[in-house]
Structures are given as structure tokens and as C-alpha cells.
Amino acid sequence: MQLNQRGKGMPRKILRLPIVLDRTGLSRSSVYQRVTEGRFPRPVSLGARAVGWIETEVEEWIARQIEVSREIRTQRAGVNPLSSR
């Protein structure tokens, strides 16, 4: 079994494009545009005409998008996220 980059014992899984689109809610062109811009994980080659994305990298991207979205929303509302602690 190959470990993920964090070594937690979970096997790495490669996601094909339809799954990436489903999980992110992005369109095909948006995914490839963001890859080109360095704003989305790069796919790995699976063969001459096939690519896939490492699941953990896609999940980390989604988590970052959620964090950024919530930070922006909090800033717009003028709420200090640390004041509730």
C-alpha cells in the first residue's frame, strides 16, 4: 500500500475529471484554466491520453476555497472572527 504524502496510512486515490467536476462544482474549462493559472492542482498523467487528480490535493483545494470564502464573508460583514473566542 502506498501512503499519502502525510503518511497517515490512507492509500492515494486518483480522481478522473467527471469526479473532480462533481466534487468542485467547476466546469471542465474552469478546472483547466485554473490549472494553467496555478490556482488548482495539476493533474497527473495516467497514460498517453488520460489524466487524473490526486484526491487529497483536490480535497485540500476545496477546504482552502471554503476558508477563503468564509474569511471574505466575515470581512464584508465587519465581524472579527477572533472576537467570539
Image (cartoon, rainbow, N blue to C red):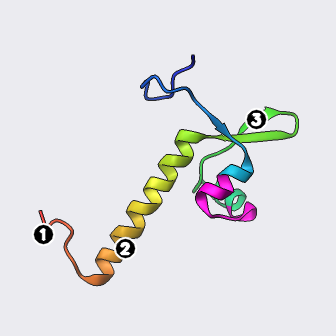
Dot 2 and dot 3 residues touching (CB under 8 Å)? no
> Residue at label 1?
83
Q: Which quadrant of the view contains residue 84?
A: bottom left
Identify which amino acid the numbered label 1 is placed on.
Ser
Viewer-proximal residue, 70 or 18? 18
Q: Picture coordinates of residue 70 (x, y %)?
A: 36, 69
Under mark 2, the amino acid is Ile
Report x, y in % for residue 44. Answer: 70, 37
The magenta segment is 20-30
From mark 2 to mark 3, how far is it between C-alphas? 35 Å
- Location of residue 9 with respect to 46 vertically, above or below: above
Going from N to C along the chain, the mark reached first, 3 or 1, is 3
Disc 1 residue crowd, few under 14, some 14–19, many 20+, Cα 10 Å = few
Q: Is residue 61 above or below residue 4?
A: below
- In this rendering, does residue 36 appear at all? no
Give the percent coordinates (x, y) of residue 34. Answer: 64, 59
- Give the main secondary structure of the magenta stretch: helix
Quarter the N terminus occupies: top right
- Residue 51 in the image: state x and y as whole percent: 76, 40
Q: Is residue 25 magenta?
A: yes
SS label for mark 3: strand
- Return the residue at label 2: 72
Residue name at image x 44 percent, y 54 percent: 63
**Dot 1: element:** loop
76 up-or-down from 4: above or below: below
Q: Earlier in the sequence, mark 2 or mark 3?
A: 3
User: Whole-Å distance between the Cαs marked 2 and 1?
Assistant: 16 Å
Rendered view: 7 above or below 28: above
Q: On residue 45, which mark appears?
A: 3
Q: Is residue 80 visible?
A: yes
Tell me the distance, in whole angstroms, between the alpha carbons under discs 3 and 1.
46 Å
